Image: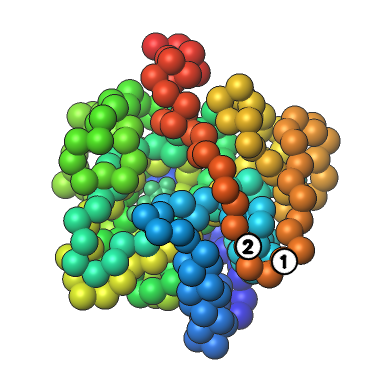
Amino acid sequence: MPAKLTPSDIEQFKDRGYIAGLPVFDASELRDLNAGLGEIVALLGPGESTKEIREWHEASRFLFDICMHDRILDYVEPLIGPDFVMWASNFFIKEPGTSESVAWHQDAYYWPLEPRASLTVWLAFDDVDVENGAMIVLPGSHAHGIFDHNRLGGAGSSVLDLECDTSAFDLGTAEHVCLKAGEISIHSDQLIHGSPANESSRRRAGLTIRYSPTNVKCDLSVNPHFRQYLARGVDRYEHNPVGEIPEQRIGRLFREHRSVEEAGAEAESKFWKK
Ligand SMILES: O=C(O)CCC(=O)C(=O)O
């Protein structure tokens, strides 16, 4: 399966902040991925949701190998440059007929990273479309800097608590990011995006994987758990701690999560100089 971006894909990413429909895994590989996902989900304890599956690539070789898969990295490299790291992964799984949504946000607002130059790969484990709650994006919104985000305080159905101010945009221009299972989309860390509930009778599961050029530095006072893995090239900066490659095929982490959201309002004001 070729994993090569065309010049027009690269233009689209620059102009619109995202690209979609890039094939990575075929049907037989996808069966293995979904079997592995089942083993990962089986590690969740009573009362834990799939949102808990964050950064488990640090404990599961199965997930690590997906995040570092050459076909994915081949798509990422022309967008981010030759030297880049992988540092985060998490599942966004919406079961059929559930109410959870994802509020409009810019990923960069959640991450204590500078400069803002990171991107997200969203890998579809299921066919994803308008009916089962595909991501929605505001094309071009990545090109206007960072917008204010309000804390929802748990009100509403969003699994993320910081909601972007979208008043500068016409929400009628929003586009759905529909994918076939095994395909990826890629979005800029400043693209405004979210997703509605899955009201269909089909699951909608995706794995997000985050990559940054090696010059990006994490504020470890906000996220002391940040660990990066060199995906391609050379790390001439050595700004951040390096993770250990997991040996066990299936494993999990037990630790608190630390984005700007979870670090709290004080860290948010400090980081965003409110
Ligand atoms: O999967 C979704 O609905 C949202 C994903 C997302 O917000 C992200 O990749 O940052």
Q: Are marks 2 and 1 in contact (CB under 8 Å)?
A: yes
User: Image quadrant of residue 168?
Assistant: top left
Which amino acid does the dot numbered 1 rest on?
Answer: Gln
In the depicted view, which residue is nearer to us: 29 or 251? 251
Q: Which residue is mark 2?
A: 251
Which part of the image, by quadrant, shows the N terminus? bottom right
* Circle 1 residue: 248
Side (left or right) of 9 relative to 253: left
Residue 237 as seen in the image, left or right of residue 124: right
Where is residue 4? Give x, y as percent: 61, 67
Question: Residue 170 at x, y = what percent?
Answer: 19, 39
Residue 251 drawn above or below residue 215: below
Q: Which residue sits at x=52%, y=79%? A: 35
**Residue at 32% over, 35% down:** 161
Q: Position of residue 123 (x, y in %)?
A: 48, 64
- Quarter the C terminus occupies: top left
